[in-house]
Amino acid sequence: MASERKATADPARSLAILWRTREPTSRSAGPGLSVDRVVRAAIDIADAEGLDALTMRRVGEALGVGTMSVYTYVPGKAELVAVMIDTAYGEMPRPAVEGDWRARLERIARDNLALYQRHPWMLRAETTRPVLGPHLIAKYDYELAAIVDIGLSDVEMDAVLTLVLGHVKSAARAASEVVDLERETGMTDGQWWQSHAPWLETFMTAGSYPTASRVGTAAGEQHGGAYGPEYAFEFGLQRVLDGISVVVAERAARR
Amino acid sequence: MASERKATADPARSLAILWRTREPTSRSAGPGLSVDRVVRAAIDIADAEGLDALTMRRVGEALGVGTMSVYTYVPGKAELVAVMIDTAYGEMPRPAVEGDWRARLERIARDNLALYQRHPWMLRAETTRPVLGPHLIAKYDYELAAIVDIGLSDVEMDAVLTLVLGHVKSAARAASEVVDLERETGMTDGQWWQSHAPWLETFMTAGSYPTASRVGTAAGEQHGGAYGPEYAFEFGLQRVLDGISVVVAERAARR
DNA sequence: CAACGCGGGCGTACGACGTACGCCGCGCGG
DNA sequence: CCGCGCGGCGTACGTCGTACGCCCGCGTTG
């Protein structure tokens, strides 16, 4: 029974904590712990040292508390991560929407990219189904507001958001990998590429992949220049927005 | 020293195995193990039971061999996964390219989606930097061939592929989550949605998110109909291709 | 004012996991 | 016929998440 409850958080349990169904423990009300303090400590750890460093023992340590005390406020690690994610969503800026839909969507994409840059662990934690916390819903509502009036159906609006945010996540993931691979290997991505390039070149030409070799080198040089991931993000974003504008224009013409 | 070698595979080590620098052990040449047998067994396990079930002990078991014997052929788990990934790429179909670039790209996207459906564990394993194995390079070359002649620069071609494949991966991930969440909870996604909908409705309206509520419900009904992820994939793919065609047309006009 | 019980806090322990280390015993080169 | 190199692996260590049950101090109640 305990074996199948592993990677995924128990939805019901998570929801209860996410929406703070439990009243704040009126017990001592002193400097005791709380869900928020636990979550904040956990986010700090994950921000600073990555998701692998996020350990229940470590969270307890950071709070000056025994490991098992953490379980008083959070049913398990999966649920803790779920609350961490929702909390991170909560700290995103939500200024009043400005400009046309394209500018608004672009702004949303950049805000999301910034979020992932600030909390790279989210990219690895969000593998499971998004947990429907209050802040995620607020975010969803806010982002929908940017495109409610451009003539798309409800389902299409959801798909547009999924598409844009999916692209942001992909790009953020690529960028994040570069960063923490540099930290792990102590080598710049460019250095790594350069040191392995001739070696790979041998295999590529041996296997006679001239196209892959040429394009790969060109792309590799971009990466060496350290703005490779950003380029992929920008290029992809413009393409996605272009693609969306095609449907939008089509809908506008039809009416 | 052992602590930092965790999630990521040692590139040099991986490459050596990926390209089979080691000669096939000429020892007994009998029914002994081999890198390929190990990898095949590992893929079978991951396909059937997911990445969490992929354990070094389990691989040894499947091969009728002690756990540590696996380490004779593979330096560690990270490297094993790297070879698994490259092997999976190797089994993709690569028919001669047909049709215009859009049809070709679309075909590529669908082939990649099928790959992820056959090997869902790849979606969780590929978090790290792609390992430059022979089959990945062959795949890259094959996919580049679909767009070499449409007037884009080398860097743009790489970005186009990154964009399309990123979308495929996002969509595949969403679909995969639905599937194995159903397996874990024993509940259809629609059932889960339906059972939690009224509850969420309460919070959404309480927080006054009418848009999120309406659109979320519409999207949720799609999901309940079990073709939600597919719709997101199709919609997004067409948008992405539309977006690419804008640049392609622009380049063609300029020349 | 005293007894109680409840719930935060936590020490210990268990069963996973990846893998370092060092021992076997077989089969081939000398 | 000897020896040694290497495939194979048993054991053990350090890590993780977390189940379980104990303690103790407080708020409530008689």
Image: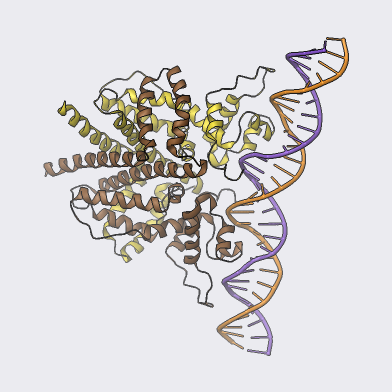
Chain colours: A yellow, B brown, C orange, D purple
Q: Position of residue B156 (x, y in %)?
A: 26, 45
Q: Is residue B23 left or right of residue B230?
A: right
- In the rendered structure, the answer to whether residue B238 lies left or right of residue C28 reads left
| Residue B179 quadrant | top left
The answer to which of B29 and B76 lies nearer the viewer is B29
Q: Position of residue A172 (x, y in %)?
A: 40, 38
Camera-side residue: B116 or B128? B116
Above-or-below relation of B245 to B13? above
Give coordinates of residue B112: x percent, y percent.
34, 51
Q: Nearer the viewer, residue A99 or A253?
A: A253
Does residue A235 sit above or below B104 in this rendering? above
**Residue A174 visible, this angle:** no
Q: Residue at x 27, y 47 (%)?
A: B155
Q: Quadrant of the C terminus of chain B?
A: top left
**x and y percent of residue A35 in the render?**
59, 26
Residue under the image location 34 percent in, 60 percent down: A201
Q: Is residue A189 visible?
A: yes
Left or right: D23, with B236 as reference point: right
Residue at x 26%, y 60% (from the top left corner): B95
- Count numbered badges in the picture: 0
